[in-house]
Amino acid sequence: MLIYAFAMLAGAGGAPRVAISIGKKDNRTAEKILGNCFSLLIIMAVILTFIFFIFAPQMLTLFGESGKTLPYAVSYSRIYILGSIFVLIVMGMNPFITTQGFAKISMLTTVIGAVINIILDPIFIFVLDLGVRGAALATVLSQAVGAVWILRFLTGKKTILHLRKENFRLRRDIILPCLALGISTFVMLSTESILSISFTSSLSRYGGDLAVGAMTIITSDTSTSDCLNLSDYFLQSSVQIICIHTLSHLPISLSPEILIL
């Protein structure tokens, strides 16, 4: 979620300004914005990779990982963070494709990455017996394919705006307005991430790995229901079942009335 927040700092901030420039028939300025935002994403990827790779154990411990799960979390995180540049390109540059009116291309970027990830996960985890590292590699490779797809499109003939080397140099008059526009989305997403980390840390402290696992299921259930537009009744019912089952196994005494509530 934190990586997504940084990606949207450039994507959500730059894409609307590109749309304004296209509306003014000023494609030259639009391409400058596109190139500057791409450079910003690369810079953020390098900084985030350095910080998270070096301090992964300390940060994951702060996030609530227990001694049992910490080695697996570190192994996954370090592989994933090495591929963060691909994640940032996919998430940060995709809005620029949608802004130009190529919604299908933007959708295919997400679909291609998801399908490849689904295919590679069982191969790397079970066939190659890589375990958690295999899951991370599958995610990185799927995002790498998505990044190549985006870069190929933005440097091809079908796009309206093109990535050009001469636009990669950061300019204050271009990048600062983009940051000002994207900061609200960044704050919203990063705050949500911080809240999730706080919940996970508290659950790990008072409920152990079982409670953390239940929280992950609930979060996934919520995300899936939002994507599929499932009813609130189904979502609330499933969450209650998960919570009751989890609370009944926690090392604390709870009355039946609390479980019912």
Image: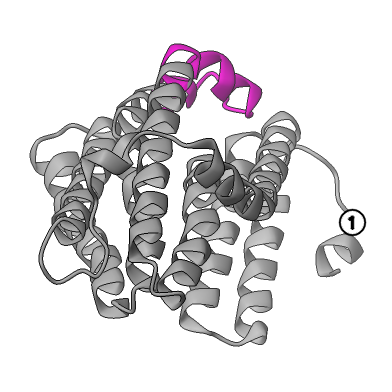
Q: Is residue 138 visible?
A: yes
Describe the colour scheme in one phrase: one colour
Image quarter hosting the C terminus: bottom right
Residue 95 position within the rendered picture, expressed as x and y whole percent measured from the top left: 41, 63
Residue at 44% x, 12% y: name it: 54
Residue type indicated by callout 1: Ser
Residue at 71% x, 46% y: name it: 191
Residue 134 lies in quadrant: top left
Residue 213 placement, left or right of 44: right
- Span colored in magenta: 52-73
Residue 177 position within the rendered picture, expressed as x and y whole percent measured from the top left: 60, 49
Residue 194 placement, left or right of 15: right
Q: Nearer the viewer, residue 74 or 164?
A: 164
Residue 45 placement, left or right of 185: left
Structural crowding at the residue carrying mark 1, measured as other residues with C-alpha within 10 Å and reported as few (<14), some (14–19) or many (≥20): few
Residue 114 position within the rendered picture, expressed as x and y whole percent measured from the top left: 26, 61
The answer to whether residue 179 is above or below residue 61 is below
Residue at 18% x, 31% y: name it: 130
Q: Nearer the viewer, residue 238 or 42?
A: 42
**Does 163 lie within the magenta span?**
no
Residue at 69% x, 59% y: name it: 243
The residue under label 1 is 255
Q: How would you classify the magenta stretch by its main secondary structure?
A: helix
Residue 221 position within the rendered picture, expressed as x and y whole percent measured from the top left: 54, 66
**Does 62 lie within the magenta span?**
yes
Query: Quick one: SS at disc 1?
Result: loop
Q: Is residue 1 visible?
A: no
Residue 42 placement, left or right of 174: left
